[in-house]
Amino acid sequence: MPQQPPAVGHVGSGPPTYDAEPTALPPADPDELDDLVADTVLDGARYGTSTLRAVSVRGDSARYRGEPRRDALLTARFGAGEQALVLVAMATGARATPGAHRAAAEACRWIARAVGRSHDRLADDIRAARRGDLKSGLHRLTDRSLGKLRASAAEQGVEPEEYTASLRCLLLPADPECRTRVFFGVGAGGLFRLRDGEWQDIEPRVAEATGEPVVGFGSPPHETPEGDRLTMDLGITTPPSPYEPAPRPPRPPFRFRASIARPGDTLLLCTGGMAEPLRGEPELAEHLTTRWSEGGPPGLAAFLADSQVRVKGYADDRTAAAVWEA
């Protein structure tokens, strides 16, 4: 069996300014200890034909300043046996707001509750390839979950823009006969696929662009040769009337993709802190290609090391979930 190349500390033009390891802890309130957020969360599982690795790591900037991780990660299995459905939810709270980490965690919990209560129907729709039903149903569940976040902001007396989060999710059926992988969510981040040694950027986009769906350029067509569809709510609003108050800025579009995995694929879902350096630094994409193309899925410690390969100029939290297909 070929040996995996060694992990590296950083790629690019030089080492980042910040230290490679955590320095300052966030401040703690003795009466609000449930509010503490660990520097790093790591998880994994294997169901059906897929092996999951998931991680959320505090960014270099937050580690240096003693700020809590704004990213949240939740992994959950609903149901049992081949009828089970695995959810990976990740969220990023708004920058420079005191409750960002709470909003992100709350967004993950709300969507997990919604998916958990509907997991039987969702699993049936995935197995039956009912993409239209899946998209509309998950859109409703996402809207409801983010609506509860806005209600929570009102209860706290803060503006909705100050207590909000991006939310990105994967649904993985445990049935080994079903290779459909479902992505849905709202907000910035990335959805990538490593296939035959090449990275494809398959994030659903608001605007179409020409070119191949590779890291850093272009977007996939509306439908791929395999029948994968990209669908979204464009969130277009009408111009404001001069006689009415200006409307709030439109919400980010709902993004959805249901795709068929092939043996040997690696699917990567991540927040902006991982997506931006992956798109912006070719050496990072090349390094992960070399690490993940041979030898099967990495162990948890190896996946953590891979997710922490640093790039100068990118210091945000990183949250990523990768799925290896047998």
Image (cartoon, helix red, strand yellow):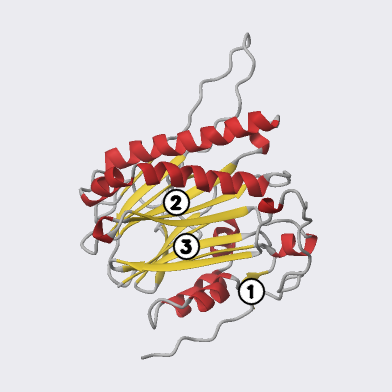
| Residue 36 x/y as whole percent | 68, 55
Specify whether residue 47 is in view.
yes
Q: Is residue 69 above or below residue 44?
A: above
User: Residue 247 versus residue 79: which sits nearer the camera?
Assistant: 79
| Residue where numbered disc 3 is placed | 321
| Residue 255 x/y as whole percent | 43, 43
Mark nearer the N terminus (3 vs 1): 1
Q: Is residue 145 above or below residue 22?
A: above
| Residue where numbered disc 1 is placed | 12
Mark nearer the N terminus (2 vs 3): 2
Q: Is residue 155 left or right of residue 128?
A: right
Q: Residue at x 28, y 39 (%)?
A: 132
Q: Residue at x 72, y 49 (%)?
A: 32
| Residue 266 x/y as whole percent | 38, 68
Which residue type does callout 3 highlight? Ala
| Secondary structure category for the residue under label 3 | strand
Label 1: few (<14), some or many (≥20) within 10 Å? some
| Residue 80 x/y as whole percent | 30, 58
Quarter of the rendering containing residue 22: bottom right
Q: Which mark is residue 169?
A: 2
Between marks 3 and 1 in the image, the one whose residue lies nearer the viewer: 3
